Every structure is written in C-alpha cells, then in structure tokens.
Amino acid sequence: MGQPDVDLAAVLHALGDPVRLALVRRMAEEGESACSPDGLDVPRSTLSNHWRILREAGVTHTRREGKARVMTLRRAELDARFPGLLAAVLGAP
C-alpha cells in the first residue's frame, strides 16, 4: 500500500466507525467521493477528521481537483494486503 506502517488494527479502527463505514460503502459503490458528500448529516469539521483517519489508515487516497478534494477507496491495495477483509466488512449489515 505504499505505507509499511499500515496495519490491520489501523484499518479495523478506521472501518469500525459507522460514519467512516458509510463513506467507504459509498466509495465502493460510486468509485469515489467528494469531501462533503450529500446525504450525511455530519459537520464538515467532523467529516474532515473521518477522512483523515481513513487516509492515515491506508483505506483511502485523496487527490486534488482544483480546489476540491476527491477520495477514492484503495480497494486493490487493501485486498492484496488483507484478502477478503473489505468484502466482509462491506457485506456486513
């Protein structure tokens, strides 16, 4: 994943929060997400913190498009490093 210090505990922590899990599910379905996606009733500052946790855990990648930031799920890297984990988490109710 490009970050040797990324470990299972960090990924599980990142995916263990309902808001972050909703963000990851959205990215899994749509391919990417804006930094403030529609339909989430979460303050912008709180969303920023959630995105940071996901990024630092190696779950997402952030790129700039002009003034906007777009997040993508690092699915291939996660599947290679932790086979079946993402599928299990995304398939859970």
Image (spheres, rainbow, N blue to C red):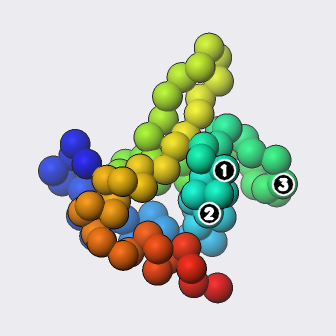
Which three-letter amino acid code belongs to the residue tagged 1? Glu
- The disc label shown at residue 39, or none: 3
Q: Identify the residue at horizontal 48%, vertical 35% (top origin).
A: 62
Secondary structure of the residue carrying numbered label 2? helix
Task: Determine whether, in the image, residue 92 is placed left or right of residue 83.
Answer: right
Which residue carries the number 1 mark?
30
Q: From mark 2 to mark 1, how far is it between C-alphas?
A: 9 Å
Q: Position of residue 40 (x, y in %)?
A: 79, 56
| Residue farthest toward the left in the current orientation of the protein | 4
In the displayed structure, 83 sits above or below 76; it is: below
Quarter of the image for residue 6 reads bottom left
Q: Position of residue 72 (x, y in %)?
A: 52, 43
Which residue carries the number 2 mark?
25
Q: Position of residue 75 (x, y in %)?
A: 42, 55
Q: Identify the residue at horizontal 22%, vertical 42% (top origin).
A: 2
Q: From mark 2 to mark 3, how far is it between C-alphas?
A: 13 Å
Q: Position of residue 32 (x, y in %)?
A: 60, 43
